[in-house]
Image: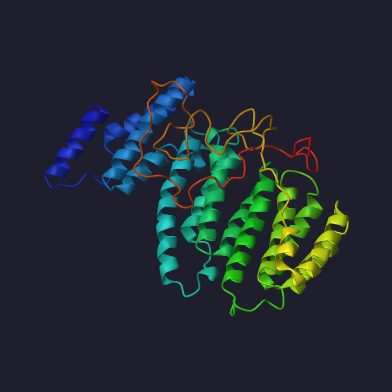
């Protein structure tokens, strides 16, 4: 009996209002065993693409039938277990990625329900299912750093953090990033993670500013959330005085000062500039700080002229450098790349799989749903991954 015949038989059972067996059909089990044996004997790209097409087809069909237990059985058949440690299974990276995908679907639903129930969303912890998903992604990057799934796994972590940020669970979002960075300290994308933590803090401060008690009166003091953001930006600039992110960090800090000036809180604006000067005493443009401090006095006399002097300097978007092997998060980089899976794929499993070639005839896997619903668009701040050679070695020499 072929896999197609098994599928036909299962459809007939469901049409007759009967249920599919609690376990995978013997034929399916045999096919899954043969997949690993074939890749062990002949580990070519073509065979790997064909094998992934087979297992993706099975997971897609069982997911559409609502049999997530059988989906898990297919995935688990390709995972390297404790008894297999001496000989890793050939699709272990695929299995970890897919397991994370399906756990992630449940995690996002659980988070949505938690947001509805929560009295204070800012105090939401990381959902246990998201913790499981993050552990699987960490395993994948650790065990298979050269896999095409490793790079997209790193970016999946960034998307999980963004999901918490969008739901105003700022502490949880920061913890997602810092925990992963602790587990992967040599990741070249570490600087992206560092700045994403600051970005979440900036989002938290912006929301607090918009929700202050009396928005009709100029604030008399810096909000605690902005104090935290300013201190984070100052610490970042001390650690990374040059590089793609340094001008962005400076502009973010002066943007905070401008926000207070826009509502007429010029003494607070002046305090922010002084705080920054104290945090970064070796700032490369001390004359600019003096000019901005003078602008705060001018703003008290003529608000628009004061604001005109608090305009941010245009800063380029950070451009990370990709790896020679697009999936390896620890390989030295060479040139810029987009935050997408390599070889024509995308972050959705229903597009071309990262492990497949660009051959238009290659079979495409088809899954029931996208893996990481949440914030659309780029969150990765560049997709470059690799070791840092030295302090600020991540940055382009022109910086």
Is residue 373 rendered to the left or right of residue 368?
A: right
Q: Is residue 182 visible?
A: no
Is residue 165 rendered to the left or right of residue 245?
A: left
Whole-percent x, y for residue 219 in the image: 68, 76
Q: Quadrant of residue 118?
A: bottom left
Nearest the viewer among 244 and 126 is 244
**Which residue lies at the image location 55% right of the left edge and 34% below the top edge?**
86
**Which residue lies at the image location 67% right of the left edge and 65% below the top edge?**
259
Whole-percent x, y for residue 218 in the image: 67, 76
Q: Quadrant of residue 275?
A: bottom right
Which quadrant holds the C terminus? top right
Nearest the viewer among 348 and 284 is 284
Q: Is residue 221 visible?
A: yes
Whole-percent x, y for residue 43 in the image: 49, 22
Q: Is residue 374 above or below residue 279?
A: above
**Which residue lies at the image location 60% right of the left edge and 61% below the top edge?**
203
Nearest the viewer among 74 and 149 is 149
Nearest the viewer among 112 and 280 is 280
Q: Residue furthest left?
A: 16
Which quadrant holds the N terminus? top left
Q: How many marks?
A: 0
Q: Is residue 236 above or below residue 386?
A: below
């Amino acid at each position: 009996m072929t896999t197609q015949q098994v599928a036909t038989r299962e459809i007939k059972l469901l049409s007759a209002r009967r249920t599919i067996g609690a376990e995978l059909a013997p034929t399916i089990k045999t096919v899954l065993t043969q997949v690993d044996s074939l890749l062990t004997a002949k580990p070519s790209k073509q065979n790997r693409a064909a094998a992934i097409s087979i297992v993706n087809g099975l997971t897609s069909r069982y997911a559409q039938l609502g049999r997530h237990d059988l989906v898990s059985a297919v995935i688990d058949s390709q995972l390297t277990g404790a008894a297999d440690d001496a000989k890793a299974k050939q699709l272990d990276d695929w299995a970890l990625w897919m397991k994370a995908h399906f756990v992630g679907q449940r995690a996002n639903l659980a988070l949505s329900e938690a947001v509805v129930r929560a009295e204070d969303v800012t105090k939401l912890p990381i959902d246990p299912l998201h913790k499981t998903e993050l552990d699987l992604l960490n395993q994948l990057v650790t065990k298979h750093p050269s896999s095409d799934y490793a790079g997209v796994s790193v970016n999946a972590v960034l998307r999980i953090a963004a999901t918490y940020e969008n739901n105003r669970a700022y502490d949880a979002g920061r913890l997602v990033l810092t925990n992963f960075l602790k587990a992967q300290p040599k990741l070249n994308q570490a600087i992206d993670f560092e700045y994403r933590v600051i970005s979440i803090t900036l989002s938290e401060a912006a929301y607090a500013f918009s929700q202050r008690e009396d928005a009709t009166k100029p604030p008399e003091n810096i909000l605690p959330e902005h104090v935290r953001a300013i201190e984070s930006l100052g610490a970042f600039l001390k650690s990374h005085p040059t590089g793609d992110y340094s001008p962005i960090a400076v502009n973010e800090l002066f943007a905070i000062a401008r926000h207070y000036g826009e509502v007429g809180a010029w003494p607070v604006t002046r305090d922010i500039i002084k705080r920054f000067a104290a945090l970064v005493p070796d700032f490369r443009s001390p004359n600019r700080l003096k000019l901005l401090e003078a602008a705060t006095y001018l703003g008290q006399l003529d608000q628009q002229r004061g604001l005109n002097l608090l305009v941010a300097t245009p800063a380029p978007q950070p451009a990370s450098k990709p790896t020679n092997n697009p999936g390896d998060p620890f390989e030295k980089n060479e040139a810029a790349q987009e935050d997408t899976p390599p070889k024509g794929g995308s972050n959705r499993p229903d597009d071309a799989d990262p492990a497949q070639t660009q051959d238009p005839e290659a079979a495409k896997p088809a899954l029931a749903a996208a893996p990481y619903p949440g914030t659309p668009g780029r969150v990765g701040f560049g997709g470059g991954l690799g070791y840092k050679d030295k302090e600020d070695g991540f940055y382009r020499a022109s910086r």
